[in-house]
Image: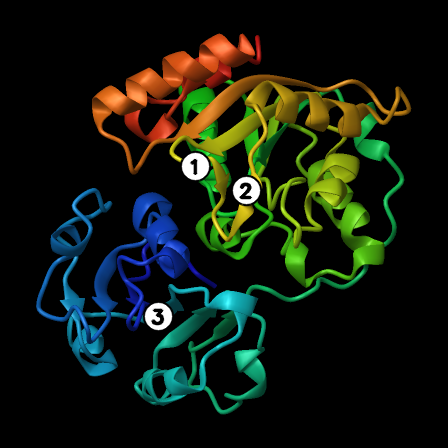
Amino acid sequence: MLTPDLPLAIYMEDTFGKPFGKMGYGILRFSRNPVVAIIDSTQAGQKAGDVMPKSPRPDCPIVATVAEAVARGAKALLLGSAPSGGLIPDNWYPALDQAVTAGLSLVNGLHQRLNDRYSNLKPGQWIWDIRQEPAGLGVGKGRARELAAQRVLIVGTDMANGKMTTGLLMLEEARRRGVKANFLATGQIGIAICGSGVPLDAIKLDYACGAIEKGVLELADADLIIVEGQGSLLHPGSTATLPLLRGSCPTAMILNHRADRLTLRDFAWLKIPPLSEVAALYEAVASCCGAFPAAKVTGIALNTAELTDAEAQAAIARFEDETGLPATDCVRYGAEKLVDSLRL
């Protein structure tokens, strides 16, 4: 439905430049689609780079209304914010109603099905409810361990710290080297960018491992499969990591970390252990006392967005010294070190 040439408007009312806007930020950085406007009435009249100096596509205009986005050529409206709990706020619906009436298609990464609200669509108009459980899932059987392809899972010390970005930049670097590589998206942002994947947080727990396994097996003709990580073993509210580990049976892992964080973002009482210990934790859970093939953490992906360049370089040196592993910020310095660590 979402072809790469379709012009998008990203709906980010009162969230552009704030943490809950990561869906929109991912689309701005990685999507091949033209983005004609960001809709946020609180920032209207500015450009993306005025609000976020490091924003991808800094010249993208910010407008106040759906009508302005339509006038700029938008053909689809993408919900670019992810409020806590993944629910659509009631005050968004008037704008969505206007978009559908204007003939725009909708890309929805939140939990409610907009197909249930809008049934009388115009010819060629569609609604993509990304976060819905696919049919035909079963329980996991550990079949991914039999694949010849190397399987790399991006794991993390916290939620929302850059795992998808790391994975996609590693994919670009691997393909640049001529490696036959695929990416398994496991969240709404990655799926919207790639066009397919596993909406893990919409899948019943009984089928979560099986869904990841199925997704990995469908990419088995590659030499390298990069699996987008979700959540963290350290996070008290996260249940996503174990299905990812069991479903993909990884051969290697990359550990993602916000370099400026000593605690989890939403839990100041939860101190992040030394990364060498976190890496050992993931390796122990992956192998499960030898029941599954061993998977080593081969590199550290740092998110240094809040640091100066000098601070970022110092953090890289510090974490390399602590862990004995190559570390980098893929956005700032490229993914070469992390791809090198896989010894393809």
- At label 3, which amino acid type do we have? Ala
Q: How is the image coloured?
A: rainbow
Comparing labels 3 and 2, the label whose residue is closer to the camera: 2
- What's the residue at 31%, 66% (across, down)? 15
Q: CA distance from mark 3 to mark 2?
A: 32 Å
Q: CA distance from mark 1 to mark 3?
A: 37 Å
Q: Are marks 3 and 2 in contact (CB under 8 Å)?
A: no
Q: Is residue 80 above or below residue 267?
A: below
Q: Residue 247, located in which quarter of the rendered image?
A: top right
- Judged from this view, the residue extending furthest toward the front is 269
Is residue 272 shown left or right of residue 293?
Answer: left
Mark 1 lies on residue = 261
Q: Is residue 341 above or below residue 66?
A: above
Q: Are marks 1 and 3 in contact (CB under 8 Å)?
A: no
- Mark 1 crowdedness (10 Å alpha carbons): few <14, some 14-19, many ≥20: some
Comparing labels 1 and 3, the label whose residue is closer to the camera: 1
Q: Are marks 1 and 2 in contact (CB under 8 Å)?
A: yes
Q: Nearer the viewer, residue 242 or 141?
A: 242
- Measured as percent of width and height from the top left, residue 204 is found at 78, 62
Q: CA distance from mark 1 to mark 2?
A: 10 Å
Which is nearer the N-term, disc 1 or disc 2?
Answer: 2
Comparing labels 1 and 2, the label whose residue is closer to the camera: 1
SS at mark 3? strand
Mark 3 lies on residue = 76
- Mark 3 crowdedness (10 Å alpha carbons): few <14, some 14-19, many ≥20: many
- What's the residue at 42%, 28% (across, down)? 302
Mark 2 lies on residue = 158
- What's the residue at 64%, 40% (across, down)? 234
- Mark 2 crowdedness (10 Å alpha carbons): few <14, some 14-19, many ≥20: many
